[in-house]
Amino acid sequence: MRKKLLLGNWKMNKTISETKEFLKDIDELVTLAKEKDIDIGIAPTYLCLETIKNNVPSSVIVASQNCHYLDSGAYTGEVSVLMLKELGIDWSIIGHSERRTYDNETSQKCNLKIKKLLENNCTPVYCVGETLEQFENNRTCDVVKEQIVEGLKDIKLEDLSKIVIAYEPVWSIGTGKNASKEIAENVCAFIRSLLVDLYNKEEAEKVRILYGGSVKPNNIKEYMQEKDIDGALVGGASLKVDSYKELIHNI
Ligand code: PGA
């Protein structure tokens, strides 16, 4: 049985003081998550990681939104997994579509980052998804397949279940146009079938696959009832405590 996961992706939002404001209500969120028996987490900017880590119980997942695939070196503006680990951060989002679009993040680069995270006993949340044009040209499966095959290249069987995958159609992110539950389930099931082909059924069944893209308190429930959707990666609706609370409540 895969435990449901709600991960808030704060993107480039919230200063440290705004983050502290949000954290005033963290106990309520944690209690609700326990009642619902789900995992919850937040991925803030690098600057706010320490503030969050130091002010939440260990049951709350704190994730970075990116990391580098090397330990150190002349890479201006980058942060390594070792640096994150020193803060106790052992989850990282990889390959978010905004990074693929604006920062030339390729599946090959994601693969290096995923390997570095696994080497350090950290959990990658690997994002995949097609653009509107690809969706309209019925290329979703081809695109997602390439992202999965390249992103997970040479990842060992025993490491597969340590990875979380997030299916986020680019056309649904921040647009208010969430994918229907049927589309989301079909692609998440397709991803799982790829994992069966690349690895085996037993390990593929252990992998948590999230849906992301305009998930709101009023639509989260429909996704959670689908067989292959194990949680949600939520941007905008995770920024306000009340909305975050409602998301947990409606799972
Ligand atoms: P959104 O973002 O919920 O604001 O659409 C989701 C994401 O980018 O992870």
Image (cartoon, rainbow, N blue to C red):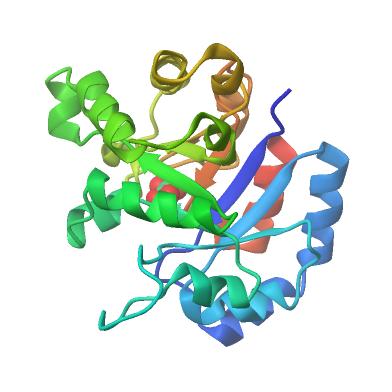
Which quarter of the figure has residue 4? top right
Q: Is residue 96 visible?
A: no
Quadrant containing the C terminus is top right
Q: Residue at x 78, y 56 (%)?
A: 59
- State left or right for residue 163 relative to residue 41: left
Q: Position of residue 172 (x, y in %)?
A: 33, 38
Which quarter of the figure has residue 61? bottom right
Quadrant containing the N terminus is top right
Q: Position of residue 160 (x, y in %)?
A: 52, 33
Q: Position of residue 77 (x, y in %)?
A: 30, 81
- Nearer to the camera, 118 or 97: 118
| Number of dots carrying numbers | 0
Q: Is residue 170 visible?
A: yes
Q: Is residue 114 above or below residue 85?
A: above
- State left or right for residue 173 relative to residue 226: left
Q: Position of residue 159 (x, y in %)?
A: 54, 38
Which quarter of the figure has residue 182? top left
- State left or right for residue 213 relative to residue 100: right
- Nearer to the camera, 242 or 11: 11
What residue occupies the far bottom of the structure in this picture? 17
- Nearer to the camera, 53 or 235: 53
Q: Residue at x 44, y 62 (%)?
A: 65
Q: Is residue 105 above or below residue 208?
A: below
- Nearer to the camera, 210 or 24: 210
Q: Is residue 6 above or below residue 15?
A: above
- State left or right for residue 108 relative to residue 41: left
Q: Residue at x 83, y 60 (%)?
A: 28
